[in-house]
Amino acid sequence: MSDALDLLKLAIHDCDGFVELRYHSKLSRNIAVEKGKLEKTVARRRLGVGVRVLEKGGWGFASTGNIDRSSISQAIQQARKAALVSAPLRSERASALPKVKLAKGDFSQPGVDEVVGRPLEEKLGMTRLLEERIRAAGSSISSASCAYTESLEEKAIVTTDGAAASFRLVRPEIRLQAVAEKDGVLSSGYESVGVTGGWDCLFLNGSGEFFADKAARTATDLLGARRPQGGRATVIMSPSIVGLLVHEAIGHTVEADFVQAGSVAAGKLGQRVGSDLVNLCDSGASEFAPGAGGTIPVDDEGVVAAKTTIIRNGILASYLHNRESAARFGVQPTGNARAWEYADQPLIRMRNTYLEPGTSKLADMIESTADGYMLDGPRNGQADATGEFMFGVQEARVIRNGKIGELVKGVTISGIAFEVLSTVDAISDSFQWDLGSGYCGKGQPAKVDAGGPYIRCRVLLGGQQ
Amino acid sequence: MDAAALLSFCQELVGRAVDAGADEAEVAVCAERQIESTLEGDAIHTVQSHDETVFGLRLLRDGAQGFVTANDIDQRTLGESVGEALDQARLNPPDSFNGLPEPSEYRGIEGLYDEEMSRIGVDDSTRIASTLLERVHQHDRRVRVDSGSVSFSVMTSAIASSKGVALVEDRTNAQGYLFGMAVDGDDIASFDYDGESSCTISDFEAKLLEAADRFSEKCLMGLAASGGESFCGTVLLSPDAVAEFLLPSLTTALCADAVRKGQSPLAGKVGEAIAAPQFTLVDDATLPGQVASSAFDREGVPTRRFVLVKDGILQGYLYNHYEARAAGGGVQSTGHASGGAGSPPGIGPTFLDLAAGEQANEDLVCAGERAVVVNRFSGSTNPVNGDFSGVVKNGFLLSGGERRAIKEVLIAGNLFDALRGVSAGSRERRLIGGTRLVPTLRIEGVSVTAG
């Protein structure tokens, strides 16, 4: 990594104005086994340098896959030319970037050598064994799959105003799916886990076998499940559903670029957007528990990726910023500028987004719920500028008179995020990161994580009429 | 590198892999030069340029496969890539269905490359992006552009294999999109988007401005929305909803890999009615001037017009070379190996043509009937069983002869039941994303839940 950092320092040495150079190497490995067959093994290598130039109030970006001084210099010229083209057409020239303490030094994360150094045979063997285990779980299992992915990232970021940081990190992930069949009816169970860090982090919340068994059990149990009656319902959300809620329904609306476009969070700083119990944060670090999948020590503008409190005691406290939006809003950048690969320009993105734990016991929360649902395992999620969200739920169980009952299928929940947060009346004292295998899409992907405790609130449940 | 040099590169790397011990090898490469002007927060934001060459090496040894891709084509990387792919093949179990297709006869597709587009510069892309923004603002100042982009790409793709495949195709691609929402005081509508893509520059700007108008209209539809009604009955899926909600899950179930893995409810149903009689779906990558067209697929098999569903009867599945061999019985690849040079061949559709119906859009629902119009669906569909559930976006409730915008309304059902529940389609069709030509569909028996 010091070679890349030195090359960038050399290339930026005699640049005028604001120039940002980012070396980014990504080495990925994928193994996929399905229904007893090895579907693929893939090794992918993508590396290059992304260049941003701020000139006369306009931004220009160029990238090169050639890691040499001449190619980087050429990319700087292209980016400068592009900035000059964009400047006169901008409705508002980008102002000087706010002065901020920029990162210097090496910020490498643990686990790299341990994960990358494990032989391919071992990873291949684990993937095959877990897939086999799902198929052996019961006679109703008709198909199974297991995919292992690891991504080694190396970055160096240098800017003309002082950033000079580098780091390495690794992100292993496992995805498991079981398909069950009975009388021509198919159902599926899905489990995944992804972290930033080593093998110990990957299996922190359960072994590979645990997740394989869980996927098989869910697929089998869903075969006999009925659809719920649609309508307003009291629900207890697991950390994975809470993670999806805080990421999709809240996090996106507080990204400063979205705020500027008119999201529901615009103009609401200092206003109540949730119950007193709600404390919601986004952090580049893995708070409360290790291994969060969206961990970054430094963002792609060279800003240390510190914790940002978005909602404090139910009051909207901050948006998420890059350096440009921070200047526009007159605040400090929050370290949320992220680019997927070297050829992507940094955008305002979340990292690890979470709700802080409360004081309730999960058992008490269930016992005091007369009529509702226990929700776990998000299938997917989307949210809107309005804060309206939609999440698919894999496992929804009826709660009746304080007891958890039968499984129902095909559940989707929806609501207006800030209204739902205002209905939160209990938050458990536990905490879990549970979206570490997730990717967020915003024109380009981003590796993120989200989680929190269990919460109880009211939502709209999609179902039969 | 020009087309000839790219093909030489592929052939040399194939030779290198075979010399190193591979029984068979295939190299695909794509060299792309792109310029792009992006929009953010109702303004021009960044102008950018990007050049990249990506290759993918697939090799077989003793029946086992290895695959490596990189964007670095220096000699050391190439040597390491061959070594890594051979290591994978050594560790992977043999699979009798692995193999590479033989060369075939190819018919070039007209209109995929526009010389004029290759001369476009960042000044042009930025001017068009600026015009696009102006068009939205002129339409209605309540419409906010959160993000957008105008880009131009010039690409050369080449593929060569030890079987003798040696193919090159030049293409150009202009793309533009807008993403945003309408804001009127405290009333914020659901976000929406629209865009256009084209292989040629001549009519691109005009088509993009039409997309900007559609975008504005869709965003404005969501203003002044109120709650809906709960019932089980009729929904109208707009062309956007058909293209982005109904077709993806259906085509996933029509891919031979899903059939083989026991993950398709349409397995074993060729020749059976899977949809209403007015439902006819064709995939065709041979149409001149379409962004999804190509003379050959990801592994060098010629593309063709392929009827998937005719008058509601399932006609067949989409195959690549591997799945055709796995299916046995003389099944041949349908030329649907998907993906770019940077990924091993998958399976997927190209240009989907869903037959038009017989009724005008405005006649799909009779006066007084109750129905929900779904302009965009934000939800999930389980690809394994077709169960879907999600929120209606920028939609309407037609009830008692009135039409009003709705919010917080969910629909739920099963995709394969919905196909059989299609009761009508519109005469008018729209091309979505340059890859799906679809009408509005009327579907019966869908559960609608209002908040």
Image (spheres, coloured by chain):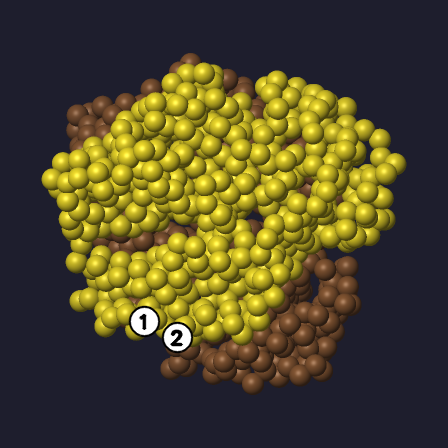
Q: CA distance from mark 2 to mark 1?
A: 8 Å
Q: Residue pushed farthest left?
A: A401
In percent of the image, x 27 and y 28: which residue is there?
A: A425
Residue under numbered circle 2: A36
* Amino acid type, mark 1: Arg
Residue under numbered circle 1: A135
Q: Does B271 sit left or right of A246 as displayed? A: left
Circle 2 SS class: loop
- Give the chain coloured brown: B
Q: Quadrant of residue A116?
A: bottom right
The percent coordinates of residue A393 (x first, y second) are 30, 46
Q: Nearer the viewer, residue B112 or B19?
A: B19
Q: Does A444 sit left or right of B169 as displayed? A: left
The quarter of the rendered structure image containing the C terminus of chain B is top left
The percent coordinates of residue B49 (x first, y second) are 71, 42
Q: Earlier in the sequence, mark 2 or mark 1?
A: 2
In the figure, A401 relative to B328: above or below?
A: above
Q: Quadrant of residue A461?
A: top left
Q: Residues within 10 Å of mark 1 (few under 14, many from 20)?
A: many
Q: Chain of mark 2?
A: A
- Residue B107 visible in the snapshot: no
Q: Nearer the viewer, residue A421 or A462?
A: A421
- Residue B327 visible in the snapshot: yes
Q: Chain A: what color?
A: yellow
The percent coordinates of residue B429 (x first, y second) are 39, 43
